[in-house]
Image (cartoon, coloured by chain):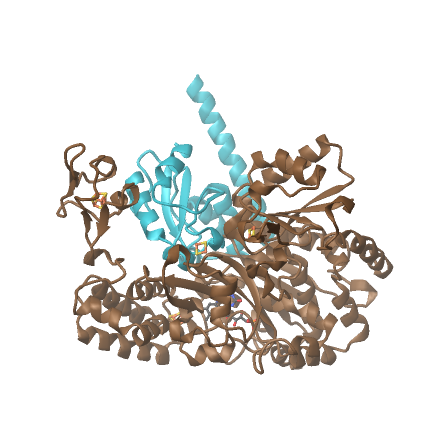
Amino acid sequence: MEQQASSCVGVAEADEKLMKVQSAISQFKMIKGALIPVLHEIQDIYGYLPEPVLQIVSAELNLPMSEIYGVASFYHFFSLTPKGENVVHLCLGTACYIKGAQGILDRLSTELKVPVQGTTEDNKFTLEATRCLGACGLAPVMTIGEKVHGRLAPNNIPVILKEYK
Amino acid sequence: MKLLTDLEAIRTLTQARLDNRRITGESPDSISFRSVMVCGGTGCTSSDSNQIIAKLNQEIAGHGIQRQVEVVRTGCFGLCELGPVVIVYPEGIFYSRVEVQDIPKLVETHLLQGKPYEKKIYEKTKQDGEILNFEETEFYKKQVRIALHNCGVIDPENIDEYIGSDGYQALDKVLKTMSRQEVIDTMKQSGLRGRGGGGFNTGLKWEFAAKQDKEQKYVICNADEGDPGAFMDRSILEGNPHSVIEAMAIAGYAIGSNQGFIYVRAEYPIAVQRFMKALEQAREYELLGDNILGTGFSFNIDVRLGAGAFVCGEETALIHSIEGHRGMPTPKPPFPAVQGLWGQPTIINNVETLANVAQIILKGAPWYASIGTEKSKGTKVFALGGKVVNTGLVEVPMGITLREVIFEIGGGIPGGKKFKAVQTGGPSGGCLTEEHLDCTIDFDTLTSLGSMMGSGGMIIMDEDTCMVDVARFYLDFTRDESCGKCTPCRIGTKRLLELLDKITEGKGSLDDLEKLENLSVQIKNASLCALGQTAPNPVLSTIKYFREEYLAHIEGHKCPAGVCKSLISYEIDPDLCRGCSLCAKKCPTDAISGELKEPFVIDTAVCIKCGVCFDVCKFEAVAIV
Ligand SMILES: Cc1cc2nc3c(=O)[nH]c(=O)nc-3n(C[C@H](O)[C@H](O)[C@H](O)COP(=O)(O)O)c2cc1C
Ligand code: SF4
Ligand code: SF4
Ligand code: FES
Ligand code: FES
């Protein structure tokens, strides 16, 4: 019974997401160069670019899948695989690097037991290295979800990660 | 809806309010109104400046002094490292690292009793028992703020405040009193050169596009800011978004375009959101759209989000990206000014470049040209980062020396360390040394020294920075970011990186050093776009100025700065070790063993050189050797 209810919710959620995708597509369909804005919306909705959704985009925008993949794989911001609940973006921009971002990255990797680009087994975290988050004054910097953590030292890492566990 | 007369009325009304936000030197007991400016830039927002604003408003309401105080959320003040930053006018008191729990006391002491709240006053504004206003500190004294002039002064989300600070007056002037050619001539005479890296004369670029006899033309604002370690464009969009909108409209008028695009990084959510809000307000006031200010001129701006590819900052690649394709560069000519977006004449300007435009129109080309050097006019915004005391955003007149920026404004190197190098120009630039500190900063001097102005990242390095590792870092970046279209760039950067890896691992030979140099020259000559053409610069400049350091890695198998992992190891000094066992507890690989209260030892065969023991040891007993 309970299971059924939850799967109903799941379906409703999925429908809602698809509706958002549809509305994004119709919003951008008329403009030239619609593909990238549409991919942004999809990534916003799902956290990555699921293949079935890209199929819809292909049909609606009249673009071959090969072109969509070509674009999606070119840009670092787009991901074709799902990510963990919390995406940790550690900045490896110059200002952060000079202030020891590599040490922070190593520590994150040890604490989470995943390499860069990896997702933890419990699906809680995905660890990513990124280029300049534009908060260089606080170097070294990382974001977890929307939250920015600055002035990091390796020892802060376990404490910060705990907040998200 | 809002028209010319309305604009004047808003200006007069708001101007009076903005007038409160300056340092007057009034004695504290005669002050009847205060402005509390809270930084809402990315740095400070990340350290909870929004909660600080909420608490301020709550406390102020609690004391019933809403009429004597205004609280304003502004853009970045520049000293982000000290954030969250709060400045109180008219005294100009600078509070740093303010926390929510400080607010009740701050309100009570400063806003009620008129006494500065000592506990959070920025240390450097205290001098001989007196408290200086922030403009008198070393950090601000030498700055000349043109592109950043409204950042930290107005509420970026309130178009009235921009108008009150003479906003949209330049657009009004241009549309009503100047011909297109006059606008272009003004820009040319000002000597403004593009701040996005190339340094091309802005007026000339506009003139090329203006001369094209085409129905449809485009204006693009390049807000991709791919340079790692630079955040001036972001800060301008966050702190003064209307200045960019106004300039794009002026550019549109000058070249005969009715459509603009801003290409902004998706990684900059606050900037994107503020810019969108500003667009909405400008449309509502009919300062964008059809028949602007009743002059018959129409102009619109659309936003396009970048998707994290550095090469998309290159103008032809950016155009392809807006068109919906992979952002790969194409050869020039044809230049975008002739054949750009969808084949139409297009000008692309950087955010900081545009932020200067309205000021130039209002104050005149001679005013702008009087600042700076013979061939580099005006000011440049730098993002000071790395091993420098005052990390942050500074705007200085061209022609200032590196020493002034690093040691006077930047406050020198922290922790009593020695200055080693300064890197300008990001991945396209190079490293300069002690002997260049008295060189002036302008486009041509930096280029002649083998570095570059670039977009304005300025990274300071101290004795703990390994220059070979820095070169490796940049090559890793450019290799990763190469679009892959041309072989010299795609494969060349990979080979360069491999050679550098080899050297940092202590496996390099003198032969490799020579290979590095030869390959660098070939990549520079044979690549299509400036990414490949400049990628070897960090290698060449570090070899040129820090050759001994390469030799130390190659011949001595040592990393003098103690950075390159393969060439260092961790050791516990038995004389300093108190046997507290903290390191052993924290070591992820159980490489440390020992008895409590006895010196501990590291098994180098098991150690992965993570440095945790070094960080945790309270007695500095762990050493890098
Ligand atoms: C690889 C590469 C990346 C670039 N990235 C940027 C950038 O992020 N922002 C920018 O304004 N210009 C960037 N440029 C320079 C632009 O191509 C272009 O010259 C500039 O936007 C023109 O504006 P300006 O004349 O106002 O400087 C880049 C150039 C190259 C070759
Ligand atoms: S030089 Fe590099 S980045 Fe530029 S077009 Fe060639 S491969 Fe692409
Ligand atoms: S460097 Fe890391 S692995 Fe090596 S001994 Fe220290 S804590 Fe253990
Ligand atoms: S270099 Fe890390 S935030 Fe800019
Ligand atoms: S973000 Fe607050 S001072 Fe820069």
> Which is more toward the observer, A100 or B210?
A100
Q: In the picture shown, does residue A90 fall above or below B521? A: above
> Which is more toward the observer, B101 or B336?
B101
B63 to the left or right of B385: right
Q: In the picture shown, does residue B209 fall above or below B239? A: below
x%, y% of residue B568?
20, 56
Q: Is residue A30 visible?
A: no
Label the brown chain with its letter: B
B333 to the left or right of A108: right
Residue at the right extreme of this rendering? B5
B407 to the left or right of B140: left
> Which is more toward the observer, B280 or B18?
B18
x%, y% of residue B244?
65, 62
Query: What residue do we see at 55% from left, 70% from top?
Result: B195
User: Which quadrant is the C terminus of chain B positioned in?
Assistant: bottom left
Q: In the picture shown, does residue B61 fall above or below B260? A: above
x%, y% of residue B434?
39, 72
Tally the numbered discs.
Answer: 0
Residue at the front extreme of this rendering? B128
x%, y% of residue B100?
57, 36
Q: Is residue B238 visible?
A: yes
User: Which quadrant is the N terminus of chain B positioned in?
Assistant: bottom right
> Which is more toward the observer, A79 or B589?
B589
Colour in which the image shows chain A: cyan
B233 to the left or right of B507: right
